[in-house]
Image: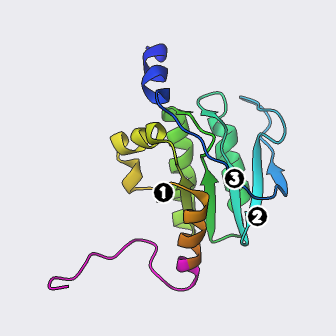
Amino acid sequence: MKFFSRFILTYGCSRADPGSALIGSCQPPQGGAQMPDGSFPVEIVNGMPVVAAPEEIDITNAEALRAALLQAANGHGTLVVDMTRTQFCDSSGLHALIAAHKRAEAEGREVLLVIPSPTVLRVFVLTGMDRVIPNVTSLPEAMVRTAATANGHSRRPQPASPGS
């Protein structure tokens, strides 16, 4: 069953380069699944933390990613999760991202996902999480969106009024 799930989730992925300077990294928690130090680099782009998600998000690293997201989000209004390199995300990865989103919402903050891969985005669409966690297809688009939010514009598009 794992092979079949992996095939469906990884078929047809594409990649893009986020292009910003590395300034630090979140360390995975002690115990449980371990990832090498620096596996979740954190960059500050226009004053916002951007966490680079790994190529695969699964049960072996989902909890460490969740911890890294919570640490990086501390004290910031918006946390951007750059999933540009991500080619595979299973249910434990979804759970980690949903947990970070729920925590951020409870604290009046936002998690914004960058998902350029149609295959990875499909996982979010099929589970309905694309309507729960805000997402865009590129890091520049995320920066524009967060700048608009910071300038007082709505985070979510408003429906058009009748007659417009």
Say if mark 3 contacts mark 1, CB within 8 Å.
Answer: no
Q: Is residue 108 visible?
A: no
**Label 3 sits on what residue type?**
Val
C-alpha gap between disc 2 and disc 3:
9 Å
Numbered disc 3: secondary structure: strand
Say if mark 1 contacts mark 2, CB within 8 Å.
Answer: no
Q: Which residues are magenta?
A: 148-164
Numbered disc 1: secondary structure: strand
> Which residue does the numbered mark 1 point to in the structure image?
135
Residue 152 in the magenta stretch? The answer is yes
**Label 2 sits on what residue type?**
Ile
Residue 76 in the magenta stretch? The answer is no
Q: Which circle's residue, 3 or 1, is located before the other in the chain?
A: 3
Q: Residue at x 76, y 64 (%)?
A: 44
Q: Residue at x 33, y 76 (%)?
A: 158
- Pick the residue in front: 71 or 142: 142
Q: Quadrant of the N terminus?
A: top left
> Which residue does the numbered mark 2 point to in the structure image?
44
**Image coordinates for residue 98, horizontal then vertical, percent:** 50, 49
C-alpha gap between disc 3 and disc 1:
14 Å
* Mark 1, other Cα within 10 Å: few <14 / some 14–19 / many ≥20: many
Q: Residue at x 40, y 49 (%)?
A: 129
